[in-house]
Amino acid sequence: MTTGRIFIVEDEWIVARDVERILKQMSCTVVGTAHDAPGALRGVADTRPDLVTMDIRLQGGADGTELARQIWQRFRVPVVFLTAFSDRDVIRNATQPGTFAYVLKPFDERQLQCAVAVALHRARMEKAFRAGAERERVLRDGLKRVIGLLSELSLAAGQDTAEGAARAPSGIADALASLSAREREVLHLLLTNHRVPSIARALFISPHTVRNHLKAIFRKFGVRSQIELLELLRNTPADDREGQPMA
């Protein structure tokens, strides 16, 4: 079963009602309709649908391809075009970013349902990809910041930890400042994608000792695992990650 929130842009009332009927048959929710470009932009802004179905030629002579481009750029909502125009120029203009399918009128129910199902699936995949990429960016920034702080905090033995820790957000600063020199070495290796065996080899200690250090590190950060530690770093606000200038 395909579900999704759809906004219909169609200047022919009978066609709009037919499209709505077909979409509801596939368990989609029609969140609104519009017959012109201004109404479409307002409607999409208000409802934030998963997908828009749209005629290429709209009331008042508006160009649907330009409207689709605006909707994609402003809201990242994709469009399925429904149109009676099949000439080469129209098709070429319709194959732009944000246009996920193209269905010729008159269409049957199956054609429209297949096009919408494929477009919804693609939209969800792209949304998940963008969200994943953003999470990775935030996590990388957080890890880079903490690794930098670890270096400042004394991978050189005997360096005072207070100065570097002052640049971290308070919770992380307290945890970092409380780490022993060996714990900072273990954490640094952990955040640079080393696992317990490779940490043990790098530091010439046993895996059991590495695990004991990790338990101490997790306790000081108030977490129970590496995953929770990474989540803590990922969720650190951007302003905090920038830190405060050194005195």
Image (spheres, grey):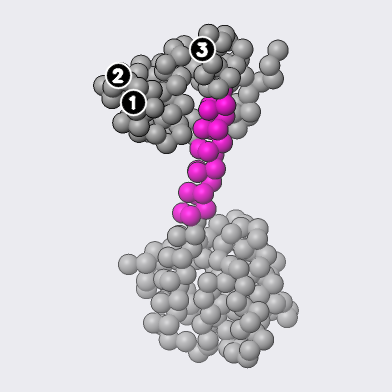
Label 1, residues with CA under 10 Å away: few <14, some 14-19, many ≥20: some
Based on the displayed image, in which of its 4 quarters is residue 142 positioned?
A: top right
Disc 3 on helix, strand or loop? loop
Q: Earlier in the sequence, mark 2 or mark 3?
A: 3
Q: Residue at x 48, y 49 (%)?
A: 132
Residue 245 percent across, percent down from the top left: 69, 20
Please say if 222 is above or below 91: above
- Marks 1 and 2: in contact by CB < 8 Å? yes
Q: Residue at x 37, y 71 (%)?
A: 26
- Residue 20 is at least partly visible in this image: yes
Based on the displayed image, in which of its 4 quarters is residue 216 positioned?
A: top left
Q: Of the residues shown, which amino acid type is indicated by label 1?
A: Ala
From the image, tell me which residue sits under label 1: 200
Please say if 182 is above or below 52: above
Residue 6 percent across, percent down from the top left: 49, 66
Instruction: Let me know if residue 72 is in the magenta part.
Output: no
Q: Kindly identify which numbered label has been placed on residue 209.
A: 2
Count of marks overlaid on the render: 3
Q: What segment carries the magenta color?
A: 128-149
